[in-house]
Image: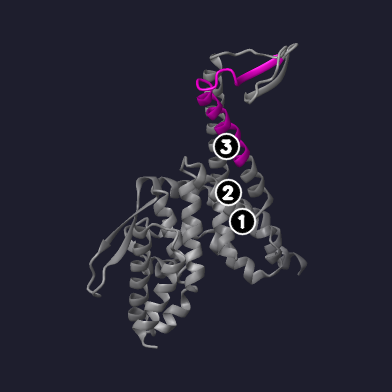
């Protein structure tokens, strides 16, 4: 529910602190990002964290992703399996279920149309510099 | 403290605060976090102590697990206890949660009460029912003693069917309303728990 989360962030008293606001914006998108990281195949928790860092500059506190994955699994959007690794301990790999793929498609559409709308709204703000010159 | 002991101590705190979860859920979480700490230390060359510092405090991490599971489990459950517990958790965060908690409590009390009176009708036929006088409802339910004449009971044994249907409908609509509310709040709640 990215829209709802975003609304909340904007309303909060922290709205005046840009860094905090940006952090919240990232956090609001974490469920969608976790699902998106699994689009191409299964990954384990640490790989998801690294994938998000590399592909979206989305740096999360390392623990944050695990409760999110757990919840997505409870909702039937992800499945998991333990796989023995060379490291000597098994790793828990996550994959998207069919429901998860469908949900991610919906999220991606909603997110894109929302972001496009906001971009149009912000266009004059970003162009302000050029106009005043 | 040695590396192993630091990890064990973190996991012990996590286990303690994950107590409301089932044993299976809890052990799986501990196994996963433990694998994360070892992998992260090996892959980044950091010490276990550094990796543990990068994780959230065990208590905060456990809280995120608990809140997320309770709400998403409740929003697909039919158990009044679980549903009310989940709304109670939300009620600490806002007026809507408090309102839904009391509406839920009220709905379950009315619905449950109606079903109980339906079950009591065959046992206390003269004391259970709907009494009317001059076209107005005087009283209803199980009454000792029953309202005196000229008020009279109007439904007879059909009270059982009517009270059962009305009670069940009240219980179902209360459950449905809470689940809708929890479904709507789930995203909001997840957000709130991360903001704290």
B166 sits left or right of B7 in the view? right
Relative to B2, say whether B90 is above or below. above
> Would you identify the image quadrant in which residue B38 lies?
bottom left
Bin the neighbour count of mark 3 within 10 Å (Cα to Cα): few under 14, some 14-19, many 20 and up.
many
Q: Earlier in the sequence, mark 2 or mark 3?
A: 2
Pointers 1 and 2 in contact (C-beta within 8 Å) = no
Question: Which chain is disc 1 placed on?
Answer: A
Q: Which mark is residue B87?
A: 2
Residue at the (44%, 55%) spot, across then down: A71
Residue beneath disc 3: B108
The C terminus of chain A sits in image quarter: bottom right
Instruction: Check the image and name the residue furthest to the front.
Output: B145
Residue at the (52%, 32%) spot, across then down: B172
Bin the neighbour count of mark 2 within 10 Å (Cα to Cα): few under 14, some 14-19, many 20 and up.
many
- Label 2 and label 3 in one chain: yes
Front residue of this view, candidates B4 and B140 = B140
Q: Which residues are magenta?
A: B104-132
Instruction: Check the image and name the residue furthest to the bottom.
Output: B1
Q: Nearer the viewer, mark 2 or mark 3?
A: 3
Residue B120 in view in this figure = yes
Residue beneath disc 1: A6
């Amino acid at each position: 529910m990215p829209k709802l989360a975003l609304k909340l962030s904007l309303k909060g008293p922290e709205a005046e602190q840009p860094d905090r606001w940006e952090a919240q914006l990232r956090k609001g998108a974490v469920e969608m990002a976790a699902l998106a990281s699994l689009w191409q195949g299964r990954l384990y928790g640490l790989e998801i964290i690294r994938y998000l860092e590399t592909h979206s500059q989305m740096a999360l506190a390392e623990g944050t992703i695990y409760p999110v994955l757990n919840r997505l699994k409870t909702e039937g959007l992800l499945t998991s399996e333990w796989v023995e690794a060379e490291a000597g301990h098994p790793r828990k790999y996550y994959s998207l279920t069919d429901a998860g793929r469908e949900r991610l498609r919906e999220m991606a559409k909603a997110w894109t149309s929302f972001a496009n709308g906001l971009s149009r709204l912000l266009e004059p703000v970003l162009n302000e510099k050029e106009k005043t010159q | 403290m040695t590396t192993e002991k630091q990890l064990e101590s973190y996991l012990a705190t996590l286990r303690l605060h994950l107590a409301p979860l089932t044993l299976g859920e809890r052990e799986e979480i501990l196994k996963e976090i433990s694998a994360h700490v070892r992998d992260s230390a090996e892959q980044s060359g950091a010490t276990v102590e550094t990796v543990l510092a990068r994780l959230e405090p065990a208590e905060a991490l456990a809280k995120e697990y608990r809140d997320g599971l309770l709400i998403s489990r409740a929003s697909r459950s039919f158990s009044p206890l679980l549903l009310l517990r989940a709304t109670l958790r939300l009620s600490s965060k806002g007026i809507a949660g408090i309102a839904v908690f009391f509406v839920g409590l009220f709905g379950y009390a009315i619905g449950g009460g109606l079903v109980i009176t339906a079950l009591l009708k065959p046992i206390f036929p003269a004391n259970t029912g709907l009494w009317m006088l001059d076209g107005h409802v005087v009283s209803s339910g199980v009454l000792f003693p029953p309202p005196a004449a000229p008020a009279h009971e109007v439904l007879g044994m059909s009270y059982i069917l009517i009270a059962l249907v009305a009670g069940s409908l009240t219980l179902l609509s209360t459950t449905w309303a809470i689940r809708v509310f929890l479904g709507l709040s789930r995203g909001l709640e997840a957000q709130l728990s991360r903001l704290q």
